[in-house]
Image (spheres, rainbow, N blue to C red):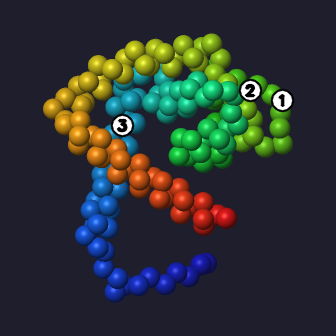
C-alpha cells in the first residue's frame, strides 16, 4: 500500500475553489451530456459514446491506432482496445492485420460507421440550438477557453508524471 502524506494546513486559493467548483460541475455535466446524447441518438441505434468514438474515427484524416483515438478523446487506450469487437460491429474496421497489442490496431470508419455519424449529425443541431438558447456567446467562449486551459494543464501534468 502506498502511503501519501496530505498537508491538512494548506488552504485552497479563491481560484482553486472556483476551479474545483467548475470541475465538479463539468463532471456532472458530462454525465448529463452522455444521458442526453444517448436519448438523442437512441432511435438511430447508437449511444452517445459509440457516436463519439465513430465521429472521432470518421473525422481523422487517416486511419489511426486505437491508442491515438483514445488519447484524442481523453480516454484510455485500454478502454478502447477492450471495445475492439464492438468497434467493428459499430462500423470501425481494422485497416491492418492482428498486431500484438489490440490498442495498436489501426481503425477507419466503414460505410455504415460514416453513415451513422452523419445521421447523428443531422439530429444534433436542433438539440444544440435549444440547449444554447439564451446563453451569451461571450460567456460560452470564455467557458470554453477556461476548460481548454485546464485540459492543457492536466495533459502536461499527466505527461510529466508519466515521463
Query: As rendered, which of 153 and 49 lies closer to the eye?
Result: 153
Q: Position of residue 100 (x, y in %)?
A: 84, 42
Indicate the quadrant where residue 3 lies: bottom right
Say which residue label 3 marks: 33
Q: Is residue 90 visible?
A: no
Please tell me whether residue 16 is drawn above or below residue 68 in the rendered image.
below
Q: Are circles 2 and 1 on residues that touch, CB within 8 Å?
A: yes
What secondary structure is marked by label 2? Answer: strand
Q: Position of residue 102 (x, y in %)?
A: 75, 40
Say which residue label 2 marks: 94
Task: Decide if residue 58 is on the left or right side of residue 35.
Answer: right
- Residue drawn at 29 percent across, 73 percent down: 13
- Residue drawn at 50 percent across, 31 percent down: 52
Q: How far apart in space, not on screen, are marks 1 and 3 (Cα)?
A: 35 Å
Q: Position of residue 124 (x, y in %)?
A: 36, 22
Quadrant, the C terminus: bottom right
* Label ID, residue 83: none
If you read the primary sequence from the N terminus, does the residue marked by circle 1 or circle 3 appear first?
Answer: 3
Q: Position of residue 129 (x, y in %)?
A: 26, 24
Q: How far apart in space, not on screen, are marks 2 and 1 (Cα)?
A: 7 Å
Say which residue label 1 marks: 97
Neighbourhood count class around disc 2 (C-alpha, 10 Å): few under 14, some 14–19, many 20 upward: many
Q: Are circles 1 and 3 on residues that touch, CB within 8 Å?
A: no
Indicate the quadrant where residue 84 lies: top right
Q: Is residue 60 visible?
A: yes
Q: How far apart in space, not on screen, are marks 2 and 3 (Cα)?
A: 29 Å
Amino acid at each position: 500500500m502506498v502511503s501519501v502524506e496530505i498537508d491538512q494546513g494548506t488552504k485552497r486559493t479563491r481560484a482553486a475553489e472556483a476551479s474545483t467548483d467548475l470541475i465538479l460541475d463539468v463532471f456532472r455535466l458530462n454525465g448529463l451530456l452522455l444521458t442526453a446524447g444517448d436519448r438523442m441518438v437512441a432511435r438511430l441505434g447508437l449511444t452517445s459514446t459509440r457516436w463519439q468514438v465513430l465521429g472521432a474515427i470518421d473525422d481523422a484524416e487517416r486511419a489511426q491506432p486505437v491508442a491515438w483515438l483514445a488519447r484524442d478523446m481523453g480516454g484510455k487506450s485500454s478502454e478502447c482496445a477492450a471495445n475492439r469487437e464492438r468497434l467493428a460491429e459499430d462500423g470501425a474496421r481494422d485497416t491492418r492485420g492482428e498486431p500484438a497489442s489490440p490498442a495498436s490496431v489501426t481503425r477507419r470508419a466503414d460505410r455504415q460507421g460514416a453513415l451513422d455519424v452523419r445521421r447523428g449529425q443531422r439530429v444534433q443541431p436542433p438539440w444544440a440550438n435549444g440547449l444554447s438558447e439564451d446563453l451569451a456567446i461571450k460567456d460560452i467562449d470564455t467557458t470554453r477557453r477556461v476548460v481548454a486551459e485546464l485540459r492543457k494543464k492536466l495533459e502536461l501534468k499527466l505527461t510529466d508524471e508519466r515521463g
